[in-house]
Image (cartoon, helix red, strand yellow):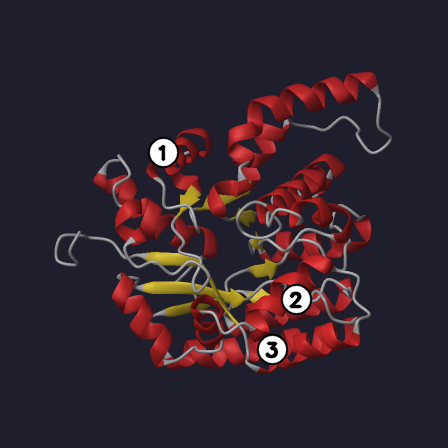
Amino acid sequence: MSDNERDYLRIAAEEAFCPPEMFDVYRRIISEGSLDDPGFISQWGYFLDSQSERAVFVREALASLGEDRIANMDRAGIDQAIIALTSPGVQVMHADEATAFAAHSNDVLVEGIKRYPDRYFGLTAIAPQDPAAAVKEMERGHELGLKGVIIHSHTLNQYMDDEKYWPIFEAAEALDTPIYMHPNTPSKDMVRPLMERGLDGSIYGFAVETASHLLKIIISGALDRFPRLKFAVGHCGEAIPFWLYRLDHMHNAMVKANRYPGVKPLERKISEYVKENFWITTSGMPWPPAIEFCQRVMGIDRVLYAMDYPYQYVPEEVGYTESVDIAPEDMKKLFQTNAQQLFRLGED
Protein backbone atom coordinates (compact mmCIF):
# COMPACT_ATOMS: atom_id res chain seq x y z
CA MET A 1 0.00 0.00 0.00
CA SER A 2 1.43 3.40 -0.99
CA ASP A 3 1.68 6.27 1.47
CA ASN A 4 -0.90 8.16 -0.58
CA GLU A 5 -3.47 5.35 -0.16
CA ARG A 6 -3.35 4.86 3.59
CA ASP A 7 -4.95 7.07 6.20
CA TYR A 8 -3.04 5.81 9.23
CA LEU A 9 0.43 5.97 10.74
CA ARG A 10 2.55 2.88 10.93
CA ILE A 11 3.79 2.76 14.53
CA ALA A 12 6.28 0.00 15.35
CA ALA A 13 5.96 -0.89 19.02
CA GLU A 14 8.97 -3.13 19.81
CA GLU A 15 12.16 -1.59 18.46
CA ALA A 16 15.53 -1.95 20.19
CA PHE A 17 18.59 0.19 20.84
CA CYS A 18 21.52 0.34 23.20
CA PRO A 19 24.26 2.81 24.04
CA PRO A 20 27.41 1.46 22.33
CA GLU A 21 29.24 1.27 25.65
CA MET A 22 26.86 -1.52 26.69
CA PHE A 23 28.73 -3.78 24.28
CA ASP A 24 31.85 -3.22 26.40
CA VAL A 25 29.94 -4.06 29.58
CA TYR A 26 28.70 -7.30 28.02
CA ARG A 27 32.22 -8.22 26.85
CA ARG A 28 33.53 -7.67 30.37
CA ILE A 29 30.76 -9.78 31.93
CA ILE A 30 31.45 -12.65 29.54
CA SER A 31 35.23 -12.46 29.99
CA GLU A 32 34.94 -12.47 33.79
CA GLY A 33 33.26 -15.87 33.61
CA SER A 34 31.20 -15.36 36.77
CA LEU A 35 27.72 -15.14 35.22
CA ASP A 36 25.80 -18.42 35.30
CA ASP A 37 23.70 -17.69 32.23
CA PRO A 38 24.70 -19.86 29.24
CA GLY A 39 21.95 -18.43 27.05
CA PHE A 40 23.24 -14.87 27.43
CA ILE A 41 26.84 -15.96 26.91
CA SER A 42 25.93 -17.83 23.74
CA GLN A 43 23.74 -15.10 22.26
CA TRP A 44 25.93 -12.12 23.03
CA GLY A 45 29.14 -13.99 22.39
CA TYR A 46 27.81 -14.22 18.84
CA PHE A 47 26.42 -10.71 18.41
CA LEU A 48 29.45 -9.00 19.97
CA ASP A 49 32.17 -10.61 17.89
CA SER A 50 30.72 -12.29 14.81
CA GLN A 51 31.55 -10.67 11.49
CA SER A 52 28.47 -12.19 9.84
CA GLU A 53 26.31 -9.78 7.91
CA ARG A 54 23.48 -10.08 10.43
CA ALA A 55 25.61 -9.56 13.54
CA VAL A 56 27.38 -6.53 12.08
CA PHE A 57 24.05 -4.98 11.06
CA VAL A 58 22.52 -5.60 14.50
CA ARG A 59 25.46 -4.03 16.34
CA GLU A 60 25.48 -0.95 14.14
CA ALA A 61 21.70 -0.55 14.17
CA LEU A 62 21.34 -0.95 17.92
CA ALA A 63 23.89 1.77 18.57
CA SER A 64 22.19 4.34 16.32
CA LEU A 65 19.36 6.68 17.23
CA GLY A 66 20.25 8.97 14.36
CA GLU A 67 20.01 9.22 10.61
CA ASP A 68 20.74 5.54 9.93
CA ARG A 69 17.76 4.42 11.98
CA ILE A 70 15.51 7.05 10.43
CA ALA A 71 16.59 5.95 6.95
CA ASN A 72 15.77 2.32 7.75
CA MET A 73 12.38 3.35 9.11
CA ASP A 74 11.71 5.30 5.93
CA ARG A 75 12.80 2.37 3.77
CA ALA A 76 10.27 0.13 5.52
CA GLY A 77 7.53 2.77 5.63
CA ILE A 78 7.57 3.07 9.44
CA ASP A 79 6.35 6.47 10.60
CA GLN A 80 7.05 6.19 14.32
CA ALA A 81 8.87 3.77 16.61
CA ILE A 82 8.55 2.91 20.29
CA ILE A 83 12.16 2.26 21.27
CA ALA A 84 13.55 0.43 24.29
CA LEU A 85 16.85 -0.87 25.60
CA THR A 86 17.67 -4.19 23.95
CA SER A 87 17.48 -7.54 25.73
CA PRO A 88 18.71 -8.44 28.30
CA GLY A 89 19.40 -4.82 29.06
CA VAL A 90 20.89 -4.32 32.50
CA GLN A 91 19.43 -7.54 33.89
CA VAL A 92 22.76 -9.41 33.72
CA MET A 93 24.63 -6.77 35.76
CA HIS A 94 25.19 -6.39 39.48
CA ALA A 95 22.53 -4.26 41.11
CA ASP A 96 24.46 -0.99 41.52
CA GLU A 97 25.88 -1.05 37.99
CA ALA A 98 22.50 -2.11 36.60
CA THR A 99 20.69 0.76 38.29
CA ALA A 100 23.23 3.31 37.07
CA PHE A 101 23.33 1.96 33.52
CA ALA A 102 19.54 1.86 33.27
CA ALA A 103 19.43 5.56 34.13
CA HIS A 104 22.20 6.27 31.62
CA SER A 105 20.43 4.38 28.84
CA ASN A 106 17.20 6.22 29.57
CA ASP A 107 19.01 9.55 29.33
CA VAL A 108 20.53 8.52 25.98
CA LEU A 109 17.12 7.48 24.70
CA VAL A 110 15.47 10.71 25.81
CA GLU A 111 18.12 12.73 23.97
CA GLY A 112 17.45 10.69 20.84
CA ILE A 113 13.73 11.35 21.14
CA LYS A 114 14.40 15.07 21.47
CA ARG A 115 16.24 15.01 18.14
CA TYR A 116 13.35 13.22 16.38
CA PRO A 117 10.25 14.02 18.45
CA ASP A 118 7.87 13.22 15.60
CA ARG A 119 9.43 9.80 14.97
CA TYR A 120 10.44 8.31 18.33
CA PHE A 121 8.85 7.38 21.62
CA GLY A 122 10.55 5.40 24.37
CA LEU A 123 10.18 2.94 27.23
CA THR A 124 11.97 3.18 30.57
CA ALA A 125 14.68 0.62 31.32
CA ILE A 126 14.91 -0.50 34.93
CA ALA A 127 17.04 -2.81 37.08
CA PRO A 128 14.73 -5.29 38.83
CA GLN A 129 17.76 -6.39 40.89
CA ASP A 130 16.92 -3.46 43.19
CA PRO A 131 13.13 -3.05 43.17
CA ALA A 132 13.15 0.18 45.19
CA ALA A 133 15.63 1.79 42.81
CA ALA A 134 13.65 0.43 39.87
CA VAL A 135 10.52 2.17 41.14
CA LYS A 136 12.40 5.47 41.39
CA GLU A 137 13.65 5.08 37.82
CA MET A 138 10.14 4.27 36.62
CA GLU A 139 8.92 7.49 38.20
CA ARG A 140 11.81 9.45 36.69
CA GLY A 141 11.17 7.92 33.27
CA HIS A 142 7.52 8.90 33.55
CA GLU A 143 8.55 12.48 34.31
CA LEU A 144 10.90 12.43 31.31
CA GLY A 145 8.00 11.52 29.05
CA LEU A 146 8.80 7.86 28.45
CA LYS A 147 5.69 5.83 27.71
CA GLY A 148 6.08 2.52 29.52
CA VAL A 149 8.58 0.17 31.12
CA ILE A 150 10.70 -2.53 29.47
CA ILE A 151 11.54 -5.71 31.39
CA HIS A 152 13.48 -8.50 29.72
CA SER A 153 11.92 -11.54 31.38
CA HIS A 154 14.12 -13.18 34.02
CA THR A 155 16.73 -11.25 35.98
CA LEU A 156 19.78 -13.36 36.87
CA ASN A 157 17.58 -16.47 36.59
CA GLN A 158 14.88 -15.08 38.90
CA TYR A 159 11.25 -14.36 38.03
CA MET A 160 8.77 -11.68 38.97
CA ASP A 161 6.20 -14.03 40.44
CA ASP A 162 8.40 -13.64 43.54
CA GLU A 163 6.74 -10.99 45.69
CA LYS A 164 10.03 -9.18 46.29
CA TYR A 165 9.54 -7.73 42.77
CA TRP A 166 5.95 -6.66 43.28
CA PRO A 167 6.75 -3.04 44.22
CA ILE A 168 7.49 -2.70 40.49
CA PHE A 169 3.99 -3.90 39.68
CA GLU A 170 2.50 -1.60 42.29
CA ALA A 171 4.32 1.38 40.78
CA ALA A 172 3.32 0.49 37.20
CA GLU A 173 -0.31 0.28 38.26
CA ALA A 174 -0.10 3.59 40.14
CA LEU A 175 1.54 5.32 37.16
CA ASP A 176 -0.92 3.65 34.76
CA THR A 177 2.06 2.71 32.63
CA PRO A 178 2.32 -0.58 30.69
CA ILE A 179 5.12 -3.09 31.26
CA TYR A 180 6.50 -4.51 28.03
CA MET A 181 7.61 -8.03 28.96
CA HIS A 182 10.27 -8.64 26.35
CA PRO A 183 12.00 -11.98 25.78
CA ASN A 184 15.31 -13.00 27.22
CA THR A 185 17.32 -16.12 26.51
CA PRO A 186 15.97 -18.91 28.71
CA SER A 187 17.29 -19.10 32.25
CA LYS A 188 20.05 -21.54 33.15
CA ASP A 189 17.76 -24.42 34.16
CA MET A 190 15.67 -24.11 30.99
CA VAL A 191 18.18 -23.33 28.28
CA ARG A 192 20.54 -26.31 28.01
CA PRO A 193 18.34 -28.84 26.15
CA LEU A 194 17.20 -26.05 23.80
CA MET A 195 20.78 -25.06 22.97
CA GLU A 196 21.60 -28.55 21.71
CA ARG A 197 19.58 -27.85 18.55
CA GLY A 198 19.80 -24.08 18.38
CA LEU A 199 16.34 -23.52 19.83
CA ASP A 200 17.40 -21.20 22.65
CA GLY A 201 16.92 -17.86 20.89
CA SER A 202 14.24 -16.11 18.89
CA ILE A 203 13.38 -19.24 16.91
CA TYR A 204 11.62 -20.75 19.96
CA GLY A 205 13.35 -20.34 23.32
CA PHE A 206 12.41 -16.68 23.72
CA ALA A 207 8.72 -17.56 23.51
CA VAL A 208 9.05 -20.47 25.95
CA GLU A 209 10.89 -18.26 28.44
CA THR A 210 8.61 -15.25 28.26
CA ALA A 211 5.32 -17.12 28.12
CA SER A 212 6.36 -19.19 31.14
CA HIS A 213 7.28 -16.04 33.04
CA LEU A 214 3.95 -14.36 32.32
CA LEU A 215 2.00 -17.46 33.28
CA LYS A 216 3.97 -17.70 36.53
CA ILE A 217 2.98 -14.10 37.28
CA ILE A 218 -0.70 -14.82 36.62
CA ILE A 219 -0.76 -18.02 38.68
CA SER A 220 1.07 -16.29 41.55
CA GLY A 221 -1.98 -14.07 42.07
CA ALA A 222 -0.15 -10.85 41.15
CA LEU A 223 -2.99 -9.71 38.90
CA ASP A 224 -5.50 -10.20 41.70
CA ARG A 225 -3.31 -7.91 43.81
CA PHE A 226 -2.82 -5.43 40.94
CA PRO A 227 -5.91 -5.81 38.74
CA ARG A 228 -5.21 -2.71 36.61
CA LEU A 229 -1.69 -3.78 35.64
CA LYS A 230 -1.04 -3.68 31.90
CA PHE A 231 1.36 -6.00 30.08
CA ALA A 232 2.44 -5.67 26.48
CA VAL A 233 3.76 -8.90 24.98
CA GLY A 234 5.43 -9.38 21.61
CA HIS A 235 5.57 -12.04 18.93
CA CYS A 236 1.82 -12.60 18.83
CA GLY A 237 1.69 -13.03 22.59
CA GLU A 238 4.54 -15.57 22.76
CA ALA A 239 1.92 -18.17 21.69
CA ILE A 240 -0.18 -17.71 24.86
CA PRO A 241 -3.37 -16.82 22.93
CA PHE A 242 -3.21 -20.18 21.14
CA TRP A 243 -3.18 -22.08 24.48
CA LEU A 244 -5.94 -20.31 26.40
CA TYR A 245 -8.49 -23.11 26.39
CA ARG A 246 -6.03 -25.70 27.65
CA LEU A 247 -4.50 -23.32 30.17
CA ASP A 248 -7.93 -22.70 31.70
CA HIS A 249 -8.82 -26.38 31.73
CA MET A 250 -5.58 -27.63 33.25
CA HIS A 251 -5.22 -24.83 35.77
CA ASN A 252 -8.73 -25.56 37.04
CA ALA A 253 -7.83 -29.24 37.37
CA MET A 254 -4.63 -28.45 39.27
CA VAL A 255 -6.42 -26.15 41.70
CA LYS A 256 -9.06 -28.80 42.42
CA ALA A 257 -6.40 -31.46 42.98
CA ASN A 258 -4.41 -29.17 45.29
CA ARG A 259 -1.35 -30.77 43.76
CA TYR A 260 1.11 -27.86 43.83
CA PRO A 261 1.76 -25.60 46.87
CA GLY A 262 2.30 -22.67 44.49
CA VAL A 263 -1.03 -23.08 42.68
CA LYS A 264 -3.97 -21.58 44.53
CA PRO A 265 -7.45 -20.47 43.40
CA LEU A 266 -7.56 -17.23 41.45
CA GLU A 267 -10.34 -14.69 41.08
CA ARG A 268 -10.52 -15.18 37.31
CA LYS A 269 -9.60 -17.69 34.64
CA ILE A 270 -6.15 -17.47 33.07
CA SER A 271 -7.81 -16.53 29.78
CA GLU A 272 -9.60 -13.65 31.47
CA TYR A 273 -6.37 -12.17 32.81
CA VAL A 274 -4.81 -12.48 29.36
CA LYS A 275 -7.77 -10.81 27.63
CA GLU A 276 -8.13 -8.06 30.23
CA ASN A 277 -4.54 -7.29 31.29
CA PHE A 278 -2.51 -8.10 28.15
CA TRP A 279 -1.96 -6.36 24.83
CA ILE A 280 0.05 -8.18 22.18
CA THR A 281 2.22 -6.99 19.33
CA THR A 282 3.05 -8.64 16.04
CA SER A 283 6.84 -8.24 16.33
CA GLY A 284 8.61 -10.89 14.28
CA MET A 285 5.29 -12.47 13.28
CA PRO A 286 4.04 -10.72 10.11
CA TRP A 287 1.90 -13.72 9.30
CA PRO A 288 -1.78 -12.94 8.63
CA PRO A 289 -3.26 -16.23 9.93
CA ALA A 290 -1.58 -15.76 13.32
CA ILE A 291 -2.44 -12.07 13.53
CA GLU A 292 -6.07 -12.69 12.59
CA PHE A 293 -6.35 -15.45 15.19
CA CYS A 294 -4.95 -13.18 17.89
CA GLN A 295 -7.35 -10.41 16.93
CA ARG A 296 -10.24 -12.85 17.14
CA VAL A 297 -9.17 -14.15 20.56
CA MET A 298 -7.90 -10.95 22.17
CA GLY A 299 -10.15 -8.43 20.46
CA ILE A 300 -9.30 -6.01 17.69
CA ASP A 301 -8.28 -3.33 20.21
CA ARG A 302 -5.61 -5.50 21.84
CA VAL A 303 -3.27 -6.25 18.93
CA LEU A 304 -0.57 -3.77 17.87
CA TYR A 305 1.93 -3.73 15.03
CA ALA A 306 5.66 -4.08 15.73
CA MET A 307 8.66 -4.92 13.56
CA ASP A 308 11.38 -6.13 16.03
CA TYR A 309 14.09 -3.85 14.63
CA PRO A 310 16.95 -4.50 14.15
CA TYR A 311 16.79 -8.21 14.84
CA GLN A 312 14.18 -8.85 12.16
CA TYR A 313 14.49 -5.96 9.76
CA VAL A 314 12.74 -7.02 6.57
CA PRO A 315 11.12 -3.93 5.03
CA GLU A 316 8.66 -5.90 2.90
CA GLU A 317 7.19 -7.52 6.03
CA VAL A 318 5.15 -4.36 6.57
CA GLY A 319 3.20 -5.35 3.47
CA TYR A 320 2.72 -8.88 4.78
CA THR A 321 1.00 -7.44 7.84
CA GLU A 322 -1.14 -5.15 5.71
CA SER A 323 -2.53 -8.20 3.93
CA VAL A 324 -4.44 -9.14 7.10
CA ASP A 325 -8.11 -9.52 6.18
CA ILE A 326 -9.72 -6.81 8.32
CA ALA A 327 -11.77 -3.66 7.74
CA PRO A 328 -9.89 -0.41 7.01
CA GLU A 329 -10.84 1.05 10.38
CA ASP A 330 -9.40 -2.02 12.10
CA MET A 331 -6.18 -1.77 10.08
CA LYS A 332 -5.79 1.71 11.52
CA LYS A 333 -6.20 0.27 15.01
CA LEU A 334 -3.56 -2.37 14.30
CA PHE A 335 -0.97 0.10 13.05
CA GLN A 336 -1.79 3.30 14.90
CA THR A 337 -4.55 3.86 17.40
CA ASN A 338 -4.10 0.80 19.61
CA ALA A 339 -0.50 1.82 20.25
CA GLN A 340 -1.51 5.43 20.83
CA GLN A 341 -4.10 4.41 23.40
CA LEU A 342 -2.03 1.81 25.28
CA PHE A 343 1.13 3.89 25.49
CA ARG A 344 -0.68 7.23 25.61
CA LEU A 345 1.33 8.59 22.74
CA GLY A 346 1.05 12.28 22.12
CA GLU A 347 0.30 13.01 25.77
CA ASP A 348 2.76 15.23 27.63
Mark earlier in primary sequence (1, 2): 2
Does residue 129 sit above or below 214 in this rendering?
below
Crowding at dot 3, Cα within 10 Å, few <14 / some 14-19 / many 20+, comes out as some
Distance between the Cα atoms at labels 1 and 3?
Answer: 37 Å
Q: Position of residue 298 (x, y in %)?
A: 46, 34
Residue at label 3? 23
Q: What amino acid is at disc 2?
A: Ile
Task: Please tell me which residue is depicted at 59% across the width and 47% down the height of the picture.
Answer: 199
- Left or right: residue 171 versus residue 8 is right
Labelled disc at residue 289 = 1
Residue 231 lies left or right of residue 153; in this view the side is left
Cα separation, mark 2 vs mark 3, equals 18 Å
Q: Judge left or right: residue 188 versus residue 194.
A: right
Q: Residues within 10 Å of mark 1 (few under 14, many from 20)?
A: few
Q: Quadrant of the C terminus?
A: bottom left
Image quadrant assignment for residue 96? bottom right
Of residues 168 and 280, the one drawn nearer to the viewer in this rendering: 280
Please identify, in this view, whether the residue under mark 2 or under mark 3 is nearer the observer: 3
Q: Quadrant of residue 42?
A: bottom right
Query: What is the residue that sits farthest to the left in this orientation?
Result: 4
Residue 71: image location, x then y, percent: 30, 74
57 versus 343 height, above or below? below
Q: Residue at x 61, y 78 (%)?
A: 22
Mark 1 touches mark 3? (CB < 8 Å): no
Q: Which residue is mark 2?
A: 126
Q: Amino acid at mark 3?
A: Phe
Sequence-first tag of 1 and 3 = 3
Q: Between residues 157 and 269, which one lies in front from this camera angle? A: 157
Any part of residue 47 in sight: yes
| Residue 181: percent from left, percent from top | 59, 52
